[in-house]
Amino acid sequence: MPRPLSATIHLDSMQHNLAQARSYAPLAKVWAVVKANAYGHGLERAMRGFALADGLALVETEGALWLRENGWIKPILLLEGIFDASDVPMLAEHNINSTVHCIEQIKMLEYTRHYRPIDVHLKMNTGMNRLGFRPDEYAAAYQRLRAIPDVRNITHMTHFANADELEHPRLTIAEQVRRFQFGAGGLPGERSLSNSGGVLHQADLGDALSNDWVRPGIMLYGGTPGGRSALDYGLRPTMTLRSEVIGIQHIDAGDTVGYGSRFEASGPMTVGVVACGYADGYPRHAPHGTPVIVDGVRTTLVGRVSMDMMTVDLTPVANARVGSKVTLWGDGLPIDEVASSAGTIGYELMCALAGRVRVLEGRMGTDG
């Protein structure tokens, strides 16, 4: 028998969340973001779960080629663009759309033979200060791209730094939109501004946030960038991590649990050992009190997470035994809640899922 740890991917939830994204931005086409192996869910599953998306977006050139080789015929967007001039023929041959965010990438397109026309997303830096041309540089970059004979369509693009908080004290979405309009005003072409946070706030911003394309990521996987919960937005978990209790200890007041003896029992308690650890992708830094579900009962992590195991409080779980079912996140336990307890974000937990974890497929509300 294999180790009793598995991650169940809910394709029905992926489809549902894509439909929710469309409902928030009904006039826009959707790039479903599938970088980092579709946030740990797998590119092949993403192709099925997001089959109704208008395109798939990612950062890995090898992933883009894999999508084409495995039958994805709709648009593909490289969110960081190309990394070397030798990548330019790939864009043309496989009809892959590339982000252009720096002058070096424009030079690659200028001096490399394309074979056939290509489409690009020209990125503006409106305050994120990672990639992109400043608003006052943007028109010149556009004109230089427009002068390349084999560059066909140019979509205008930016990325929000604080889309989870409309009135962020340092930089609001509205201010980034203002800068975008200043830099791209009067230039022809479609526009792509919104990540998940922007999509979820579309109703709050109205016509000020006009997108031809949106780029939802985390919301497609049942998480949110911050603020309200995924459930508040009608989103469903797409990954459920489950295991079982593999050992039980009965301890007394003053006894400690785990490496470093950091947890001390205040009274008699029952401790369950669960087959999951940081080598499986569960955060080592998750503290005492991080929620878990055992046999349908909500309880908590105790002691330090080790490589292959973790320990949980079974005292409130009647009839707990070796073999009791454990949910670590997902169906019934939002991944964002677990991540918040561990001082991180749901994105990291999804992407950190280790290769040794069995991955299954199942519908929400089943055992996977």
Image (cartoon, rainbow, N blue to C red):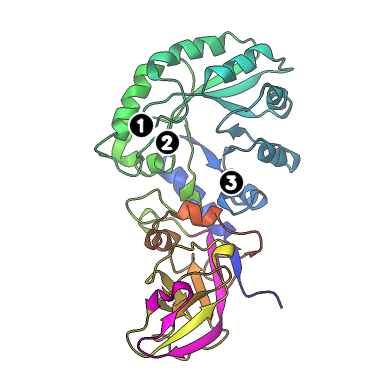
**What residue did someone put label 2 on?**
194
Q: Is residue 330 left or right of residue 82?
A: left
Q: Which mark is residue 153?
A: none
> Residue shown at 55%/61% (left/top)?
281
Q: Amino acid at mark 3?
A: Ala
The residue carrying mark 1 is 209
Indicate the position of residue 61 as horizontal and vertical percent values.
66, 35
Residue 247: in magenta span = yes
Residue 182, given in percent of the width and then of the height, sits at 34, 18
Badge 3: how crowded within 10 Å, few (<14), some, or many (20+)?
A: some
* Residue that label 3 marks: 36
Residue at 41% x, 51% y is: 224
**Would residue 239 be counted in the magenta stretch?**
yes
Query: Where, by quadrant of the figure, is residue 91 drawn?
Result: top right
Q: Nearer the viewer, residue 178 or 287?
A: 287
- Left or right of 251 in this view: 307: right
Residues at discs 1 and 3 in contact (Cβ within 8 Å)? no
Are the residues flagged by discs 1 and 2 in contact, CB closer than 8 Å?
yes
Whether 99 is drawn above or below 11: the answer is: above
Nearest to N terminus: mark 1 or mark 2: 2
Mark 1 or 2, which is nearer the eye?
A: 2
What span is in magenta?
237-263
